[in-house]
Amino acid sequence: MQRASPQEFSRVLSSMCTEPHPAARAAAEEFLATNPGDPATYETVADLEREAITALAEIAGHPDAVGYITSGGTEANIQAMRIARDRGPTGGPVTSERANVVAPASVHFSFHKAADVLGLELRTAPLDDDYRADPDAMSELVDGDTVAVVGVAGSTEYGRVDPIPAIADLASEAEALCHVDAAWGGFHLPFTEHDWQFDHAAIDTLTIDPHKLGQAAVPAGGLLARSSDLLDELAIDTPYLESASQASLTGTRSGAGVASAAAAMDELWPDGYREQAERCQANADWLAAALDERGYDVVEPELPLVAATLPEREFDALREAGWRIARTASGDLRIVCMPHVTRETLREFVTDLDRVE
């Protein structure tokens, strides 16, 4: 079989994953054969997972948070909704077949998967004029069968941060679980003025992915819960393993992802991530200004994600030139200024754009 090589990241402008930090890459290779799903057998990687969760809890503003390293944001979001379903709208088991989750229209597509898998109704509310959640619109969808209210801290299409404290208040009034999806934004937001984490609002669960802006190897997502009783909702007995119970969705998990996440955060938190956040945001601001100067309608970047109108002909020409770009659901060009996206890369992109205008 011909040996294949992974594609280069140099022209990847649409992905929320990036090249792993060298320490993360080395750690992943070292722990390829380990399984944190059986922590009593694989004790070293279990220790690393505890280190990773401790680091994530600090980043998310609640040192006592509990959780585990998931395969990514989708698993973490599904598991959070599973906690909500089993916990129920008033802290008890769900008795109604109408159990529902209320979220903004910007919510990640993983919540549609969660609703389908868990038998929940997903109710999405329209956004405000700046692509953020509208708590008033969300409140109209909440009722006595609402088990979770969701906010997004770094939306995948426009990089917006929802008003998390107001959403948490809405969840509290409904006696529902409050979940925040910070899968992408979680490693950038600590260096902003946004209110998004556990110490900013009465959040119950939070998704945050080391394999995105955290620079860990894929797969390495993260699910955090404010208290152990919430995570206990997920626990099942594992009679044939050395470990007595398991809260994760998958059985066998990636020791490589766990070790990589622990290594990346050990190397980069906080100063490395701060420098990264400043550089990525500066690149996004530069690109937004360059597109604006050329007459494109640009959504001002709140986080390092740029969206702008772009005619189909120009979009297709850039794709043919090798640029990995994508569109939002409404058709806007979407570029994510991840750590591998340099200013030089963006200049090359703009030069190619000038050629195809």
Image (tube, rainbow, N blue to C red):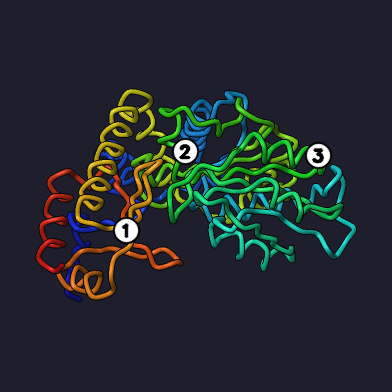
Tell me the residue that label 3 is attached to.
173
Residue sitting nearer the eye, 64 or 103: 103
x, y percent for residue 77:
59, 52
Q: Secondary structure at mark 1?
A: loop
Q: Earlier in the sequence, mark 3 or mark 2?
A: 3
Tell me the residue that label 2 is attached to.
186
Name the quarter where the C terminus is drawn: bottom left
| Quarter where residue 196 is shown | top right
Question: Residue 14 bears which disc, if any?
Answer: 1
Residue at horizontal 90%, vertical 58%? 95
Of tags 1 and 3, the one toward the viewer is 3
Is the Cβ of the residue at disc 3 closer than 8 Å to that at disc 2? no
Q: Secondary structure at mark 2?
A: helix
Question: Residue 202 bears which disc, if any?
Answer: none
Q: Earlier in the sequence, mark 1 or mark 2?
A: 1
Residue 136 appears left or right of 215: right
